[in-house]
Image (cartoon, rainbow, N blue to C red):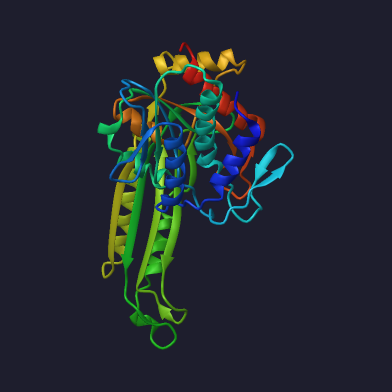
Amino acid sequence: MPNQERLVNDFCDLVRIDSPSGEEWDVATHVSDRLANLGFQVARDDHGNVIASEDGTQRPLVLSAHMDTVDPGRSIRPQMVGDRITSDGNTILGGDCKAGVAAILEALESVRDDRRPRRPVQVVFTRGEEIGLVGASNLDFSMIAGTEAVVFDGNGPVNTITGASPTYMAFDINVRGRGAHAGVEPEKGLSAIKIASDIIAELPQGRIDHETTFNIATVTGGTVRNAVPSEASLTGEFRSMNMESLELLRMQLLAAVSSVRGRYQEAEITETLEMMFQMYRLDPNEATAQLVMRVMRDMNLQPNIQPSGGGTDGNVFRLNGIESVVVGMSTNLMHTIDEYVVVPDLMNTARFCEQLMTFGA
């Protein structure tokens, strides 16, 4: 049985380790040491993903979560407020996805403590999930022995199963105009910020329909207050579970850039688009999904299959032939300073992971 005090303490220790995307080395060392102490052979692939294996096992169950967090995620100070763990209000909590990491580690500790038989597992903790599933996309799949995976990276309690996830398109637009003194000869300038704003004005924003969204994420430009800005850039994304909607948005983006380019022929405007991950819809009849739901029902938890607007490493695993199911990890209001983890839900996540490993063993 998972130990609640140990689980909460371990989770709080994890979130105190700064690990914004691209800076996961300290947390990777921490979890590697924990896994080695549990008897795993721990390695890192060329991208820095942590892969823990058991000697001689074939077709293990893959347990996965990611190590990175979003900003503001430095110097996190977890607080206990009733049965919730929160930050101090100045940062995110980092429950996404360290609640998943903590639950996996506690489940392994609990099974070892109780000397219970379990099926072989392989643990995969990835980098850079928050910036487009970069770690999973660069994962050395030749090191992965399993063909079934449970990914602990969903919002809400563990019985929340991600039933569908969208295709995600990222875009960058860069504008080069012409600088000039803003007070002396502004007419000689060509404002890159004004050009960028004209592009933005022709683009949608927010929810397009029940399975499609579009977001302008960052806008930068200019150097000083009294100069016509010569450069500006903007980044954004759009995502959908409908391929026709994705294509229409792609065409709308390119048309907006082309239209503004035609109006400002002296400017240089460049755009790049990249598909970061592809959609999937979960078939509840898949063997891994059936296993997950059976374990949940045995725990008196009702499986709650819901679509998600977000992507997880499960998207990438599926593209690489690994049947994956994404479950909740007890985190709520992810990516905000109001994020919190419900301790009973965190315990259920660890219990579920333990039951998953020991089911039928």
**Image quadrant for the N terminus?**
top right
- The image shows residue 90 at horizontal and vertical percentages of 62, 56
Please say if 335 is above or below 320.
Answer: below
Identity of the residue drawn at 31% across and 40% down: 137
- The image shows residue 203 at horizontal and vertical percentages of 41, 51
Identity of the residue drawn at 62% across and 41% down: 9
The one nearer the camera, 198 or 28, is 28
Answer whether residue 249 is visible to the viewer in this image. no
**Image quadrant for the C terminus?**
top left
Q: Quadrant of residue 7?
A: top right
Q: Residue furthest bottom?
A: 184
Please say if 336 is above or below 114.
Answer: below
Please say if 234 is above or below 275.
Answer: below
Q: Quadrant of residue 248?
A: top left
Q: Is residue 297 left or right of residue 165?
A: right
- The image shows residue 273 at horizontal and vertical percentages of 30, 48
The one nearer the camera, 154 or 120, is 120
Q: Quadrant of residue 43?
A: top left
Total marks drawn?
0
Identity of the residue drawn at 56% across and 41% down: 95
